[in-house]
Image (tube, helix red, strand yellow):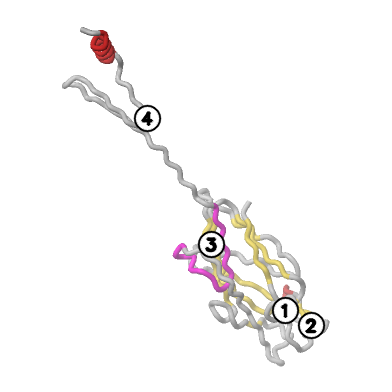
């Protein structure tokens, strides 16, 4: 037998004496006919879930179906008391809003813990001629819509409101909505004119939701 053949036989015999070796994630185990061989392989998985915060006040996407898209529509709520009603202390309902009658859909959906909600105005509603009506004259009442608990509404002021804190459950997921109904409190007699408007004379209120 030449040297090459002898080396091949030696290596072949040695390989029979080695335990089974597994490279990467293929695994083969062998045993006697009466044995139960076992083999393992491994796969690592990871899921990357984005942090998400959705806020809707008024016209917006259909969040109840899981559609979270931006919508640039800004609704206008209008109060028009008659001359006989002005300052009589009886609240005046509004018109407009995505639910009509001065009522807006309000919703917060998040998946990363507590959420803080507030509202900011640039100042009192102005008529552009030096007269004004404070935002404290506009009240917001929250009633249930689809969630078990109605989403609380910030109390409007001429600046930034106090924070409304939504406490997340153990799942860290918040889904709260409400119908926010706006009224003009109408507790003071004021000069005639149009106060506010479409993004003029301090008319616009900015609602802001934040997560930690």
Q: Quadrant of residue 32?
A: top left
* Disc with the residue nearer the chain's start (4 vs 2): 4
* Disc with the residue nearer the chain's start (2 vs 3): 2
- Give the labeled residue for mark 2: 128
Crowding at mark 2 (Cα within 10 Å: few <14, some 14-19, many 20+) = some
Bounds of the magenta span? 51-66
Q: Which mark is residue 24?
A: 4
- Give the labeled residue for mark 1: 200
Which quadrant does the N terminus fall into?
Answer: top left
Nearer to us in this view, 110 or 189: 110
Mark 4 element type: loop
**Marks 4 and 2, how far apart at CA:** 76 Å
Q: Residue at x 27, y 24 (%)?
A: 29
Q: Residue at x 31, y 28 (%)?
A: 27
Nearer to us in this view, 66 or 188: 66
Q: Nearer the viewer, mark 4 or mark 2?
A: 4
Mark 2 element type: loop
Q: Nearer the viewer, mark 3 or mark 1?
A: 1
Nearer to us in this view, 70 or 118: 70
Would you place residue 197 above or below residue 15 in this image?
below
Residue 92: % across, % down: 65, 83
- Give the labeled residue for mark 3: 176
Q: Nearer the viewer, mark 3 or mark 4?
A: 4
């Amino acid at each position: 037998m030449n040297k090459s053949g002898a080396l091949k036989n030696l290596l072949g015999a040695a390989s029979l004496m080695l335990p089974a070796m597994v490279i990467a994630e293929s695994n083969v185990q062998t045993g006697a006919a009466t044995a139960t061989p076992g083999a393992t392989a491994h796969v690592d998985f990871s899921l990357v879930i984005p942090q998400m915060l959705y806020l809707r006040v008024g016209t917006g996407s259909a969040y109840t179906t899981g559609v979270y898209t931006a919508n640039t529509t800004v609704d206008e709520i209008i109060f028009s008391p008659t001359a006989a009603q002005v300052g009589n202390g009886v609240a005046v309902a509004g018109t407009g809003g995505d639910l009509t009658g001065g009522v807006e859909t309000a919703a917060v959906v998040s998946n990363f813990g507590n959420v803080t909600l507030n509202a900011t105005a640039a100042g009192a509603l102005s008529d552009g001629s030096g007269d004004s009506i404070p935002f404290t004259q506009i009240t917001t009442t929250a009633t249930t819509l689809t969630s078990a608990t109605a989403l609380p509404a910030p109390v409007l002021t001429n600046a930034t409101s106090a924070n409304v804190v939504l406490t997340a459950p153990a799942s860290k997921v918040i889904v709260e909505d409400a119908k926010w109904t706006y009224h003009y409190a109408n507790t003071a007699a004021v000069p005639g004119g149009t106060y506010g408007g479409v993004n003029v004379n301090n008319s616009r209120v900015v609602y802001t939701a934040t997560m930690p």
